[in-house]
Image (spheres, rainbow, N blue to C red):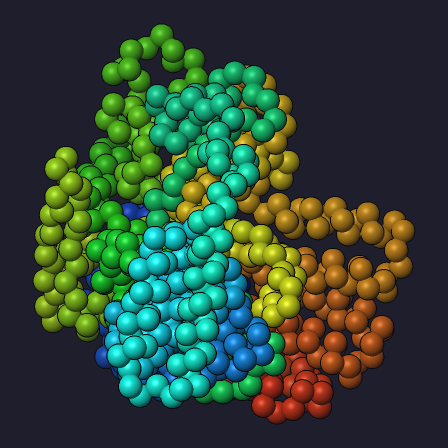
Amino acid sequence: MSPLRLLRRGTARAADEDFLRRLALGNGVGKDPRAALFYKQEGNKRFQNREYAAARILYSKVEVPSGSRRAADEDFLRRLALGNGVGKDPRAALFYKQEGNKRFQNREYAAARILYSKAVSHNSPEMSLCYANRSAALFHLGQFEDCLEDIDRAQAQGYPDRLQPKILLRKTECLLLLGRLQEAAGVISKVESKIAMDQSLTSTTRQILLRKISQLKVKAHEKESSPLSVPEALSKTQKDLEFWEENGKISSASSSVSLNFNSCKGRHLVATKDILPGENLVKEEAFVSVLSPGKGLLLQDSAETTWDTRVTNGDLHCHRCLKQLLASVPCGGCSYAKYCSKKCAQLAWEHYHSTECPLGALLLTLGVFSHVALRTVLVAGFAEVSSLVKQFHGDDKELYKTEARGKSLDETRDSTAGMEDLSEKAKPLIPGCEDDGQYQGSYQAVFNLLTHAEKHSPEHKFLCSLSIIAICKKLLDTNLTIFSQESCESQSKLKAHVKLSAELSPELKILGEAMLRHMLQLQCNAQAVTAIRESESGDSIVADSEEVRLATALFPVTSLLNHSCDPNTSVTFSGTAVTIRASQPIPRGQEIFHCYDQAVELLMRCRMDAENFLSAEHMLVGEIEDHLAQGYAMLGKWQEAARHLQRSIQIVETRHGPSSVETGHELFKLAQVLFNGFAVSEALCTIQRAETVLSVHCGPQNAQVQELQEMRACLLELPRSLLHRVE
């Protein structure tokens, strides 16, 4: 596995920074006077206030890049992306099919289903067999509707005629179990006809098939003679008992809250009445979401092969709606994107994936935040993006005029509190609101989310710029056509083509400027879409129950909530939708708060409690330290994560010994964290220790040993002056 995949296991922000930090450092950016000039310009007042110069600097540099530096950048990024192949390979399809067959024979049906799904993601002459085999796994898992869909897909792909009786009998059994007796009878007749006409069948095979048909007829007769008894709980649609009254001013928000603004808190939500615990406050669909690959989960007893048998979020969830996948529908152009239905696949293609598909390897390499930035402008459409970028530049000029007259932005956009007596037209608009004062979950609201550019380091802003340059360059190289898709009242879609020439077109520069803005916004406005993944029995592919990060998304209304370590709300997700409920009584006039890093806060309290009654070497203390390290890694705080892992390692060493396999696994985690945090010297030392221990216990072909070797190779590509650097 490529070391780059390790980066994708952390936060998208960290992945973006670390990939491109290596890209920048590997080309001597730190010693380039032009880069120093860039950093100086980045720090000026205009950029810090509203990044007015950021995009201008970015695209002025794009026009006249250094030839050698640009070539080195492109070559390095190209090599990084090699480990993220998303093309279709018939050999991979055959491999995954064979691996799935092994699992199926061992009755590991859940694992077999996933491997067959990996197989159908690649073009293969045996595609029909892959679908048919997956239908068999789904049948044994009790997923009869999905089984029927896969049977239809297998037949559409040219399933061999000699095997038709077998798959039709499976279809009959599914229909009977679903109570669709008339359809089942029709399929039985079709099977009988095929058996009668097929002269190639041996007498033994014919007898087996006829015996099976006889058994199915008996089942059908039994179901006809006994009326179906559906439990009352299942025959009724569950009613939503939660009270909900839509807010007239804020889309997706309850009437129990209002939108306020002031120079200190910015935009924020306030309770308009006394709110009880459990009351819904926000129910919002994401404006845009991108599935996070997440960490790979090895199937039990997986062999080390050319193709990756790890199971990631991309294998388990729809790449558009995040619904759990049972019978995935693959993208026709790449092996990475998988969907829950043809409808999701088509909608994704129309709105963004037709542009993203050829960029798959690059987007996986740059990380989720870069991907979200691109998808945001694609979903919005060029016309909307262009309009707001131009409006933003117009506001820029007006701001300078205002400042020249001695007025500040805060004076023109102060709090709405105490302004009830003003008419709607007299009130200053809160940023992001429409002309009528309503705050919609629209691209205008997304565009006006704060970037907090003054809080980002110059290095980070430079790396964000490099990310956008890489995407724009790839769009240029692939000669793609970027188009806007807008829904008119008639629901017709307009396509405004933007042609790419040898140089960046004005349209592409506009998209790039917007993407850079979104990259900076995501640091404080991105929402991690999470879910609880339960362990399964038998052929489980998941170690235990845990909260996993499914996607990174932008929720314009949810982003209005300010952070508090003592929040008064709780957050749950269903697909791409978020629901925010009051977790405690909220009196009228109190601000609505949300906690962005609640896991770390709770774990810190847990550790403090544990210190009162557990010894410092207790294994439970080590587990808490380990989970804290995971929490800080999710936030991209690599130094904190490393400190907690080092404490966990001390406890594991005390209990199991410094050369134990348990210590080796902990050292592997520490190596990942140090690698992501770009602590080069410490990472190399830890990689050596982990490799030595794990090679003894697991052998040199072990997946973790291979990753450690690739991490070391990646770090050793850096200039010599950086090899002893510790951050």
Name the residue nearer the viewer: 598 or 102.
Answer: 102
Query: How many marks do you count on the picture?
Result: 0
> Percent x, y for residue 241?
51, 26
Name the residue nearer the viewer: 356 or 187.
Answer: 187
Name the residue nearer the viewer: 214 or 676.
Answer: 214
Query: Is residue 556 depicted above or below 703 in this figure?
Result: above
Query: Is residue 270 depicted above or below 109 in this figure?
Result: above
| Residue projecting furthest to the top | 421
- Residue found 29% across the figure and 38% down from its top: 442
- Residue found 34% across the figure and 79% down from its top: 163
Q: Quadrant of residue 64?
A: bottom left
Query: Is residue 502 depicted above or below 373 in this figure?
Result: below
Q: Is residue 414 visible?
A: no
Q: Is residue 611 visible?
A: yes
Q: Quadrant of residue 315?
A: bottom left
> Percent x, y for residue 22?
44, 74
Name the residue nearer the viewer: 233 or 91.
Answer: 233
- Residue found 60% across the figure and 86% down from its top: 702
> Percent x, y for residue 29?
38, 73
- Residue found 68% across the figure and 76% down from its top: 665
> Percent x, y for residue 545?
64, 57
Left or right of residue 248, residue 696 in this image: right
Q: Quadrant of residue 248?
A: top left
Figure quadrant of the C terminus = bottom right
